[in-house]
C-alpha cells in the first residue's frame, strides 16, 4: 500500500475487499511517522498501542460482518486530531505548555462521533498554541515543517494535522478554523480543507479560541473524503447551544453533478497589490478550468474588506482573553507567565479592548463592522452562487520569515478572516503549484452551502488532479 | 439615630433556584444535601477546557415568574454576558451573568413604609465553595464545586429604602414571595438566600445622592441585616460629623460584637470586562412563551390576603404564618370554605393553628378532621343543668377519695372531678359553669 496517495475511498474499498487489514493500515501510518516525524514535528502525542489494538478489534468485526461499513462509515480510517480536540484519556495540550500535562476525562462531541463511525485515533497533532497563528511556529513545542519543503511552514494553526495527512501519517487531520487555521494549512500542504458554517459542527469539547468564530473542520486528500467526514461530524449537538438545526446533507451523493450555469463571483478587493503574481496567475488559470466546466465568472465587490482584519483583531483577542482566563494557575499546575508570547499578546489586547471606557470604542465598534462584513457577503450572494479567492496572498513562507513581525504574520490571513467574521463556509482546494509549492484556492458560499461547495470543488479536482502530487520532502 | 441624616439604602439579594439540574449543565442541583464534595460535577461546571454551557429553560422561566410577581417588565430579547474576575471558586475565570439586558426590570415591592422600586431581576450561575481547613497539619483551602453552576437569581432594588426596619421588611417580603412561587427554599443559614445592602447617609434636606457607599455583605439573617444597618448608620454619622467621608468599601457583620468590619476596600469600581457570552445565543421571549409563563403564575399574595380578609375577616399577619408555597393555597381555601360553611370563625381557627393550640397537621390531615378537632376544642355544648348534675353525681359516687380530699379542704380535687366529668360526657363544656356546679354538688 502507498499511504502517500491513499484516500478514504480507496482505503474503505480495500478494507472491505480484504486487500489489506485495518492493522496493516495503522501500522503503515506509524511507520511513516517514525520515518518522517522527527523532521516534520507533526505530532505531540502518539496513540500507537491503543490504535493497533483498536485496528485488530475492527479487523475482527469486518471478518464477521461485511455490512459493518454501513453502520460505521469510517471504519478503520486513521485520523490525526488537532490538539485542541479533547480526547478522553489521551493527553490534550492545545499546543501549549500550560496544560502540557492535561489528560481530559471526556471526548469532544466530534471525537465521539468519529470514533463511533469507526475511525482510529493515530495521535494528537502539533499546532500554534491555542490556535493563535498562521504558520505553526507559535507552538510551545517544536515547529512543524512543510512536507513539500522542510524549510517552509505548513500553515497554521492546524499545522500538524496538515503536515500529517500530507506525508502519509493519517488519512484525515482535524482542525479548527477561527480565522484561517484549516484552510491555510490545507492550502500550503495540498489538501482539501473545510471551514464549515458556524453552527454546522459542534464545538463541545474543542478547546475554545474565540467562541463566536471557532468552526470545526478537517483536512483530507480529496473532496470526496472531505465530504464523507462532514457527513459524520455535522449536526445539532445538545451540548452546544450554538449548533443549528439545519438538515445534514448527504454531501457525497451530489458529487459529480454538473455545475453548468454556476455563477462565480470574483471580489475585486481580493485581487490587489500584495498578492503574489504566481498565486494570482494560478487562481486565474483555475477560473478558466471552472469556466470550461460551465461556470461563468463575474466581478463583485465586498466593500468593507479593508476593515475586516482590524475588526477581527479586536473581536478575536477579546474572546481569547476571556477563554484563556480559566488557565489561572489554580487547577492546571502552571501559572500564567508560562503562556507563550502570542497568547500573552492576545490576552493583553483583549483585556484592553474589553475594559470599561474602551469597550464602546473597540469591541462594540468592531462588532458593528462585523455586521457590515456579513452583509457584504449576503449582498454578493444575491448575484452569484459562490466566490472564488486565493487562500493565501503568498506561497508557503520560510520558517522564521514572519516570526519577528506579528502584524506581517496576521496579514497571512487577509483572505481568510472575513469568512469567519461572516460565519459562512469555505473550502480550500488546490489551485495548482508554483515553484514546486502548493497554491490554495478558496470556494466560499452562503450559510449552509457546504453541499454546493463540494460539488464545485469535486468537478474541479477531477479535472485538475493536483491531489495526486505528493510531497518529496525537499530541503530535508 | 442622629436626626441629621437619612439613610439611603439599596439592596442586592441573591437567591439559589431549586431547579432539578444546574444552570448550564445537567448536573444535579443539590449542593446542600450532597453526601460528599465535588460529586455533582461535570466538565461544564468544572470549567474544563472545551466544555460549553447550555441554558436551563426552567431557570429562565422561574426568573421571569419572579419578575412578574414583583411587577417587573420583561425584556423581549435577553442575553447572557461574561463577568470576569479571578477567584479560586470560579473555574472559568468568568461568571456567566447578565449585564445590560436582564430578563426583568422596573418592578416594585410594597412595604408598610412605602414602595421600593425593583431595578432588575437577572439570572446567573453560582460559584463553587471554598473550604479552609487543616489537612495533615497544614492550612489549606479546598474547593467544592457541587454549588458551581447552580442557578442564582439576583434582585436589585432602587436606593429607596430609608430605614433598617424597612430593609428587613423588604427582605422578608422578598423571601415570602420567592417561597410562595416555590422556586427556591431561600434558606439564609445555608446560603440559599444572601443579602447585601448598600448604605450611605444623606444630610437632611439635601437632594443629591451621597458620593460614597458602603456595601454590607454576607448577611445571613434578617436580624443581622437590621443590626448591621443600624451599626453602619451610627458609624457613618460619626465620620460625617467629623467632616470626613466614609471609605468606599465592603464590610461584613460580626454578630458577637454586634459590629460591622472592613472586608475589602474598593479604590475604584472593579472592571469586570463584561461582553456578550458567545457560547449562548440571545434569548427571545415570545408573546406565546410569556403567556405560558403567566398562565403558570399563582394569584398574587396581596390578592390572596385581600380575598381572605374580605371573605373570612382573616388578617394577613396571621394568615402568612400558615403557609409558604402557592401550591398550599388550594387546600387552605378549602379549609376556610368548609369552616365558614360550618358557621365557625375562620380567624379563630387560624389563630389556634398558628399558635399550635390545635395540634393538626396542615396539608396532611383532612379538612373535616381539622374542623372536627376544632369543634371539640372550642364549641361549648348545649347541655342542661339536670343532665350535668346527673353525671356529676355519678362521678362523686365513683370517686370517694377525691371527694373526701375536697371535704378536708383540698380544692385541687375539683380539677380532677372536672376532668372526670368531661371524660364522661365527651363534650366541651364551659369550664367555669362546670366548676361551679361541681362545688355546689360536693358541698351538699
Image (tube, coloured by chain):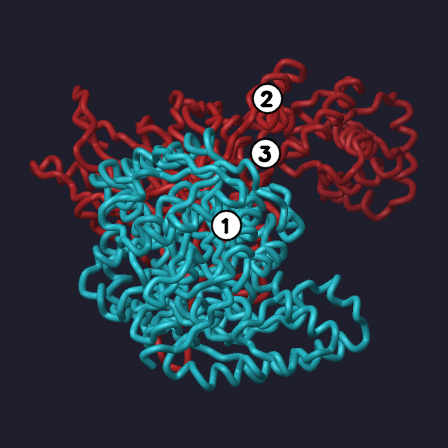
* Chain hosting mark 3: B
Q: Position of residue B200 (x, y in %)?
A: 23, 35
In the rendered image, which quarter is residue A132 located in? bottom left
Give me the disc on residue B181: 3
In the drawing, what numbered circle is on residue A391?
A: none
Residue A212: image location, x then y, percent = 42, 46
Q: Chain of mark 1?
A: A
Q: Are marks 3 and 1 in contact (CB under 8 Å)?
A: no
Helix, strand or loop at label 2? It is helix
Q: Is residue B261 visible?
A: no
Residue at the image position 43 percent from the left and 23 percent from the top: B108
Of tags 2 and 3, the one toward the viewer is 3
Q: Quadrant of residue A56?
A: bottom right
Q: Are marks 2 and 1 on the same chain?
A: no
Q: Colour of chain B?
A: red
What residue is shown at x 55% (from left), y 82% (from top)?
A: A48
Cα distance between the residues tagged 3 and 1: 45 Å
Q: Which chain letter goes with mark 2?
A: B
Q: Give the answer, above or below, for where B166 lies relative to A142.
A: above
Residue topped by disc 2:
B305
Distance in Å between CA atoms under marks 2 and 3:
15 Å
Q: Which chain is cyan?
A: A
Whether residue A79 is situated above or below residue B401 in the rendered picture: below
Q: Position of residue B185 (x, y in %)?
A: 56, 44
Along the line of sight, the residue nearer the viewer: B260 or B268: B268
| Residue wearing tag 1 | A196
Amino acid at each position: 500500500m502507498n499511504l502517500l496517495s491513499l484516500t478514504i475511498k480507496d482505503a474503505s474499498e480495500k478494507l472491505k475487499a480484504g486487500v489489506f487489514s485495518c492493522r496493516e493500515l495503522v501500522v503503515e501510518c506509524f511507520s511513516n511517522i517514525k520515518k518522517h516525524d522527527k523532521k516534520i514535528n507533526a505530532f505531540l502525542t502518539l496513540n500507537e498501542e491503543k490504535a493497533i489494538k483498536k485496528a485488530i478489534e475492527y479487523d475482527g468485526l469486518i471478518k464477521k460482518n461485511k455490512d459493518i461499513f454501513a453502520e460505521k462509515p469510517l471504519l478503520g480510517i486513521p485520523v490525526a486530531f488537532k490538539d485542541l480536540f479533547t480526547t478522553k484519556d489521551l493527553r490534550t495540550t492545545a499546543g501549549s505548555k500550560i496544560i502540557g500535562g492535561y489528560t481530559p476525562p471526556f471526548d469532544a462531541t466530534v471525537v465521539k462521533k468519529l470514533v463511533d463511525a469507526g475511525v482510529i485515533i493515530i495521535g494528537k497533532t502539533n499546532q500554534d498554541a491555542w490556535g493563535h497563528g498562521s504558520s505553526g511556529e507559535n507552538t510551545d513545542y517544536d515547529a512543524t515543517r512543510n512536507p513539500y519543503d522542510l524549510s517552509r511552514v505548513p500553515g497554521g494553526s492546524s499545522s500538524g494535522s496538515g503536515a500529517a495527512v500530507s506525508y502519509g501519517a493519517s488519512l484525515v487531520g482535524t482542525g479548527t478554523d477561527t480565522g484561517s487555521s484549516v484552510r491555510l494549512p490545507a492550502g500550503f500542504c495540498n489538501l482539501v480543507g473545510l471551514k464549515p458554517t458556524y453552527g454546522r459542527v459542534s464545538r463541545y469539547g474543542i478547546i475554545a479560541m474565540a467562541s463566536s468564530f471557532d468552526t470545526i473542520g478537517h483536512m483530507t486528500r480529496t473532496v470526496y473524503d472531505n465530504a464523507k467526514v462532514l457527513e459524520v461530524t455535522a449536526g445539532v449537538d445538545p451540548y452546544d447551544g450554538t449548533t443549528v438545526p439545519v438538515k445534514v446533507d448527504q454531501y457525497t451523493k451530489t458529487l459529480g453533478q454538473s455545475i453548468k450555469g454556476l455563477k462565480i463571483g470574483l471580489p475585486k478587493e481580493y485581487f490587489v497589490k500584495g498578492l503574489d503574481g504566481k498565486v494570482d496567475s494560478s487562481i486565474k488559470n483555475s477560473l478558466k478550468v471552472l469556466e470550461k466546466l460551465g461556470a461563468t465568472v463575474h466581478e463583485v465587490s465586498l466593500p468593507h474588506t479593508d476593515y475586516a482584519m482590524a475588526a477581527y483583531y479586536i473581536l478575536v483577542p477579546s474572546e481569547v482573553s476571556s477563554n484563556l482566563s480559566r488557565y489561572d494557575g489554580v487547577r492546571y499546575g502552571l501559572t500564567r507567565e508560562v503562556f507563550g508570547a502570542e497568547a500573552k499578546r492576545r490576552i493583553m489586547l483583549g483585556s484592553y479592548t474589553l475594559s470599561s471606557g474602551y469597550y464602546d470604542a473597540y469591541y462594540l465598534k468592531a462588532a458593528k463592522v462585523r455586521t457590515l462584513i456579513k452583509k457584504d457577503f449576503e449582498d454578493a450572494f444575491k448575484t452569484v452562487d459562490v466566490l472564488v479567492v486565493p487562500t493565501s496572498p503568498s506561497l508557503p513562507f520560510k520558517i522564521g520569515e514572519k516570526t519577528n513581525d506579528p502584524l506581517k504574520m496576521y496579514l497571512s490571513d487577509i483572505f481568510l478572516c472575513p469568512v469567519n467574521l461572516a460565519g459562512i463556509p469555505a473550502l480550500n482546494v488546490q489551485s495548482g503549484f508554483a515553484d514546486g509549492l502548493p497554491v490554495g484556492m478558496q470556494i466560499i458560499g452562503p450559510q449552509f452551502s457546504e453541499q454546493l461547495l463540494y460539488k464545485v470543488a469535486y468537478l474541479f479536482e477531477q479535472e485538475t488532479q493536483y491531489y495526486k502530487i505528493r510531497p518529496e520532502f525537499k530541503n530535508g | 439615630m442622629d436626626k441629621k441624616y437619612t439613610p439611603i439604602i439599596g439592596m442586592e439579594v441573591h437567591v439559589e433556584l431549586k431547579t432539578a439540574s444546574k444552570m448550564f449543565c445537567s448536573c444535579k442541583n443539590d449542593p446542600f444535601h450532597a453526601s460528599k464534595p465535588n460529586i455533582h460535577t461535570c466538565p461544564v461546571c468544572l470549567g474544563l477546557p472545551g466544555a460549553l454551557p447550555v441554558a436551563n429553560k426552567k431557570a429562565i422561566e422561574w426568573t421571569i415568574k419572579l419578575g412578574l410577581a414583583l411587577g417587573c417588565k420583561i425584556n423581549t430579547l435577553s442575553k447572557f454576558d461574561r463577568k470576569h474576575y479571578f477567584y479560586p471558586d470560579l473555574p472559568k475565570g468568568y461568571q456567566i451573568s447578565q449585564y445590560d439586558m436582564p430578563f426583568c426590570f422596573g418592578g416594585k415591592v410594597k412595604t408598610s413604609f412605602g414602595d421600593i422600586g425593583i431595578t432588575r431581576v437577572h439570572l446567573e450561575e453560582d460559584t463553587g465553595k471554598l473550604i479552609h481547613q487543616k489537612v495533615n497539619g497544614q492550612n489549606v483551602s479546598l474547593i467544592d464545586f457541587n454549588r458551581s453552576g447552580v442557578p442564582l437569581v439576583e434582585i436589585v432594588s432602587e436606593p429607596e429604602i430609608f430605614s433598617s426596619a424597612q430593609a428587613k421588611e423588604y427582605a422578608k417580603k422578598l423571601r415570602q414571595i420567592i417561597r410562595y412561587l416555590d422556586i427556591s427554599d431561600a434558606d439564609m443559614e445555608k446560603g440559599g438566600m444572601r443579602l447585601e445592602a448598600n448604605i450611605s447617609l444623606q444630610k437632611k434636606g439635601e437632594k443629591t445622592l451621597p458620593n460614597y457607599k458602603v456595601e454590607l455583605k454576607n448577611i445571613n439573617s434578617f436580624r443581622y441585616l437590621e443590626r448591621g444597618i443600624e451599626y453602619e448608620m451610627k458609624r457613618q454619622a460619626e465620620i460625617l460629623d467629623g467632616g470626613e467621608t466614609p471609605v468606599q468599601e465592603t464590610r461584613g457583620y460580626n454578630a458577637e460584637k454586634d459590629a460591622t468590619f472592613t472586608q475589602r476596600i474598593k479604590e475604584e469600581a472593579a472592571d469586570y470586562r463584561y461582553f456578550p457570552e458567545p457560547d449562548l445565543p440571545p434569548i427571545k421571549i415570545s408573546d406565546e412563551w410569556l403567556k405560558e409563563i403567566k398562565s403558570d403564575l399563582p394569584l398574587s399574595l396581596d390578592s390572596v390576603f385581600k380575598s381572605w380578609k374580605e371573605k373570612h375577616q382573616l388578617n394577613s399577619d396571621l394568615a402568612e404564618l400558615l403557609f409558604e408555597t402557592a401550591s398550599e393555597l388550594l387546600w387552605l381555601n378549602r379549609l376556610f370554605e368548609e369552616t365558614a360553611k360550618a358557621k365557625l370563625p375562620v380567624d379563630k381557627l387560624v389563630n389556634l393553628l398558628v399558635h399550635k393550640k390545635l395540634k393538626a397537621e396542615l396539608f396532611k390531615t383532612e379538612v373535616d378532621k381539622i374542623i372536627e378537632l376544632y369543634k371539640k376544642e372550642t364549641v361549648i355544648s348545649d347541655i342542661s343543668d339536670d343532665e350535668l348534675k346527673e353525671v356529676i353525681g355519678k362521678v362523686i359516687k365513683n370517686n370517694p377519695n377525691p371527694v373526701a380530699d375536697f371535704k378536708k379542704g383540698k380544692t385541687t380535687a375539683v380539677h380532677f372531678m372536672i376532668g372526670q366529668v368531661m371524660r364522661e360526657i365527651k363534650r366541651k363544656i364551659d369550664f367555669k359553669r362546670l366548676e361551679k356546679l361541681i362545688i355546689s354538688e360536693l358541698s351538699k
